[in-house]
Image (cartoon, rainbow, N blue to C red):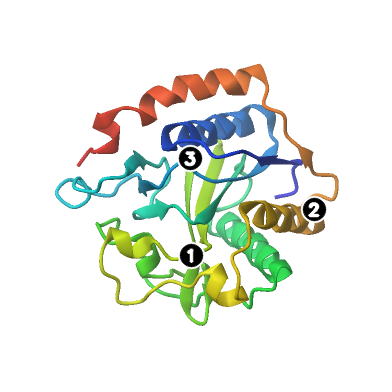
Amino acid sequence: MTSRWRLLFTEPLDGIDNMALDHALLARAARTGECVLRVYSWASPTVSFGRHQRTAGTYDHIALAVVRRPTGGRAVLHAREATYSVTAPVTRPLRATYAGINSLLLDALRRLGVDAALAHATSSPPPDAAPCFETATEGEIVVGGRKLAGSAQWRNGGALLQHGSILIDDDQSLLGPSTTPPATLRAALGRAPTVHEIADALFDAARATLDPDATPLVLDPEVCADVEKFRALYADEGWTWRA
């Protein structure tokens, strides 16, 4: 990915607005050819479901905000974590771009002082009701063999969106019992870094490895209009709870 990169840190938003903004940035990538690395958090604890995940009868009892992501994968509780998204024009095969972005995550985590690594080859889990952090798939970020960052990618209209979560603390057990607790930044570092610290590490890694001239992104009226358009999808109960 050698295109021009832009960097975006956003203050906490609700699930609908977070997903609508990521979707709008995907449309921007197709329109402009620029890549955007966004780092953000959530206004309140929110469960996000994967695009194809079955949820009825499993998560409809949870007394938390819920939203369905445009990307695949399994359920994630967004609470004490940092979320990132990358939007970019499609220029390489899925596995290559996925590996490149995960290498960026790995670089950023090492800048924070985390002894992280890429997971070895495993079979990809189905989009079932199990939580995302139950299993690390090939190329995802692990610490001591346990998953620290989960990611998923979606391609549409000549552009891609990859986003995922980096756990600061472990809240994922609220989604259900886990045989393998995930790794956390608190456990790896002996402290809980802020979302701002994580964003700084990711932005430094992007400038070092992707684009030394990467600059902050200011949202233009076209992106803002797209956010409003896509809000309708992510606010739709039929989309959120579809089988």
Camera-nearest residue between 218 and 89: 218
Q: Is residue 72 above or below residue 150?
A: above
- What SS does tag 1 mark? loop
Q: From the viewer's perspective, is the residue at label 1 or at label 2 nearer?
A: 1
Disc 1 target residue = 169
* Secondary element at image label 3: loop
The type of residue carrying mark 2 is Arg
Closer to us: 36 or 81: 81
**Quick check: can you spot residue 118?**
no
Quadrant in which the C terminus is drawn? top left
Which mark is first along the chain, 3 or 2?
3
Can residue 167 be seen here? The reply is yes
Between disc 2 and disc 3, the foreground one is: 3
**Alpha carbon separation for disc pair 2 and 3:** 28 Å
Residue 205 in the image: state x and y as whole percent. Answer: 74, 58
Residue assigned mark 3: 43
Instruction: Name the residue: 56% across, 57% down.
Output: 98
Left or right: 72 with respect to 117? left
Q: Position of residue 149 (x, y in %)?
A: 51, 63
Q: Residue furthest front?
A: 191
Residue marked by disc 2:
207
